[in-house]
Image (cartoon, rainbow, N blue to C red):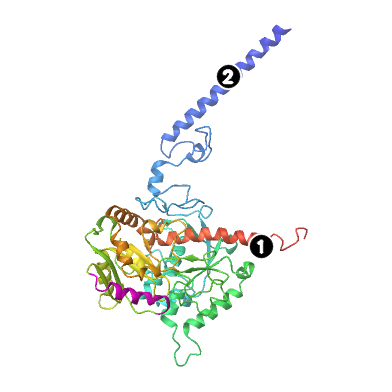
Amino acid sequence: MSWISEKSILPSKLLSCLIAFSIFLLISSSLSLLEFNDSSLIPKSVLQFILVNNTSINPIPNVKEADTQKGPVNSPVFPYETPNPEKIIDEPEKHRKRQCDKSQALLRVYLYDLPPEFHFGLLGWKGSANQTWPNVSDQKTIPSYPGGLNLQHSTEYWLTLDLLASNTENVVRPCSAIRVMNSSEADVLFVPFFSSLSYNRHSKRHEKQKASGDRMLQEKLVEFLFGRTEWRRLGGKDHLIVAHHPNSMLTARKKLGSCMFVLSDFGRYSAKIANLKKDVIAPYKHMVRTIPVDNSPHSMNANIGVFQGAIYRKDGGVIRQELYYLLKDEKDVHFTFGSVQSNGVKEAGKGMASSKFCLNIAGDTPSSNRLFDAIASHCVPVIISDEIELPFEDVLDYSEFSVFVRSEDAVKKGYLLNLLRGIKREKWTKMWEKLKNISGHFEYQYPSQPNDAVDMIWQTISRKKTSTLLNVHRKNRYSRSQFQ
């Protein structure tokens, strides 16, 4: 009986072997088709799901296809992790895509379709009937931002352009932030009010006006937002408003203070309205010409220090006057009055490019454009501003490329120059090299590029958003009965 059962088992074992061998041949022949062109009988999309390394069933991108797209197929710039801005992007196309996947973006942003009078209309742009936004696919048709001192506070302009570009097929940009059309899908709701330009252009009241044009726009904005379900849902905590000029949003800032602000500093804000816990510090757009990294002219034989700008200031800026009288007669220090008129910006750029250190001294507010002019000129900043907050400082260590001096020390006779002259060549060169490496993080441009100023701001907002939502969720713990 046992002999019969063993004999009957043999054919089944043989059949199993034949089936296994046939499956092996089928897989081998299928995999070989991956080397052929698109006319293969089995679609590549099917074959790419075959287990190749016994550990993953994810599609493996074709190397040639990835090269054509100039970026990783399945990952955003920094997929849900703290970025490493110290890394220099030698291949600017590396993390850029024509099509961004909203499920992989760091930020999904809802853009309010405010009338043009709040944004590009302030630039003189007039679209066709019912047209809210300009065509951003053609750079020639994009309204330009006014130059001069207006340009240093143009952050909202660049962020708005970048969001519009995220839905434009022929614009290649990073995928850190992407515009979504449904507010319920958004992490952040962006309010496209060009508040700095509104202040610069319309803050003065004309004779027949009850209020200035800037004030009226702010009042309209408050009325609009308070009437929105989206605002009432979290009391505005998931809303984003750019108010980069220190005097912008003066009328509305208190009423809208629950939102996330993008600011140049906190100098004219109370701690309750603006603070590092919820708000973002963004760089000024520098005024001087950017010096190419490979063409930086500095040497240890240059001036020890330079400052060119307004000397007589009020409040915290009084220190400029004190330093002027301390340093004006020093042979290796260029300390003089300067303005945007009479080629002032060009002359300031030349002075920075020929100096080892650039003095960034507090003015009417803790920050000034001079810091970012210094960075663009690869001139090691000397920051004399005790209350200053710096862009991207959670991921950038400014002490690696800047010198910080307390105001009380800076005005001591001989202290500042002795400190700067005592910095050895090796230390200065290390700071200078670091400065060149990080300077790209402070460049505003369109289209944006990985880790430039626009991209870095979105990344910072993403990190702020996480802490904001944490606080909201914690407050919701006992706000309602779990049995309702």
- Residue 483 sits inside the magenta stretch: no
Local crowd size for mark 2, using a 10 Å CA cut-off: few (<14), some (14–19), many (≥20):
few
Q: CA distance from mark 1 to mark 2?
A: 63 Å
- Against 65, is 317 above or below? below
Q: Position of residue 200 (x, y in %)?
A: 41, 79
Q: Secondary structure at mark 2?
A: helix
469 and 131: which one is in front? 469
Question: Of helix, strand and loop, which mostly describes the magenta segment?
Answer: helix
Q: Which residues are magenta?
A: 314-330
Image quadrant occupied by the N terminus: top right
Say left or right for 247 vs 3: left
Amino acid found under the numbered disc labelled 1: Lys
Q: Which residue is mark 1?
A: 475
Say left or right for 200 vs 220: left
Image quadrant occupied by the C terminus: bottom right
Q: Position of residue 383 (x, y in %)?
A: 37, 66
- Against 225, is 439 above or below? above
Amino acid found under the numbered disc labelled 2: Cys
Q: Which residue is mark 2?
A: 17
- Against 363, is 186 above or below? above
One can see residue 134 in this view: no
